[in-house]
Image: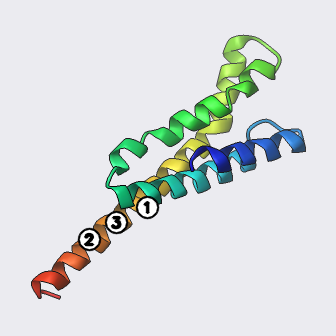
Amino acid sequence: MLLGPLLLGDGVDVLVGRGPCWGVAVGATAGALLAALAAVRRRSLGMVAPLPVVAVAVVTAGAVLTSHGPLATRLVRWAVAVFPAMAAAECAVVVVALAAVAIRFRFGMKRTGRA
């Protein structure tokens, strides 16, 4: 669930002819959202939470290999390009986690008769 949208977004960025850009950010966010929703149902969100950053790093590592210039420069450009995608994906996981806590809290309040 996490890799499908991310790979699709990366493919769109490659077809457009740019490095990791909006396609990766949107794909990473959508994939993280889907994976987090699936993990909430299985009560394994803690296992999924760190994966979006790793997935974005691995999928976009080709940008470092195919760009030109010194390795240090390529790594800095890559990090600057993919950081927004990593941050957006992690924010999607946090939103799902907060929503799950709020729903469980509200359900618990109704169950005890406090609502």
Viewer-side label of 1, 3: 3
Q: Earlier in the sequence, mark 1 or mark 3?
A: 1
| Relative image position of residue 87 (x, y in whole percent) | 53, 46
Q: For the residues labelled 2 and 3, say whether their Cβ atoms are less than 8 Å apart.
A: yes
Q: Which residue is mark 2?
A: 104
Viewer-side label of 1, 2: 2
| Relative image position of residue 73 (x, y in whole percent) | 71, 18
Q: Which residue is mark 1?
A: 95
Q: Is residue 115 above or below residue 59?
A: below
| Relative image position of residue 63 (x, y in whole percent) | 75, 27
Q: Is residue 45 above or below residue 86?
A: below
Residue at point 74% right, 38% down?
20
> Distance from label 1 to label 2 (Cα)?
14 Å
Dot 3 falls on a residue whose secondary structure is: helix
Dot 1 falls on a residue whose secondary structure is: helix
Residue closer to the observer: 40 or 100: 40
Q: The residue under label 2 is which amino acid type?
A: Arg
Residue at point 37% right, 61% down?
41
Dot 2 falls on a residue whose secondary structure is: helix
- Crowding around mark 3 (Cα neighbors within 10 Å: few <14, some 14 to 19, many 20+) is some
Q: Is residue 21 visible?
A: no
Residue closer to the observer: 103 or 78: 103
Q: The residue under label 1 is which amino acid type?
A: Val
Residue at point 73% right, 50% down?
22
> Distance from label 2 to label 3 (Cα)?
6 Å
- Crowding around mark 1 (Cα neighbors within 10 Å: few <14, some 14 to 19, many 20+) is few
Look at the image and name its color scheme.
rainbow
Q: Which residue is mark 3?
A: 100
- Crowding around mark 2 (Cα neighbors within 10 Å: few <14, some 14 to 19, many 20+) is few
Q: Quadrant of the C terminus?
A: bottom left
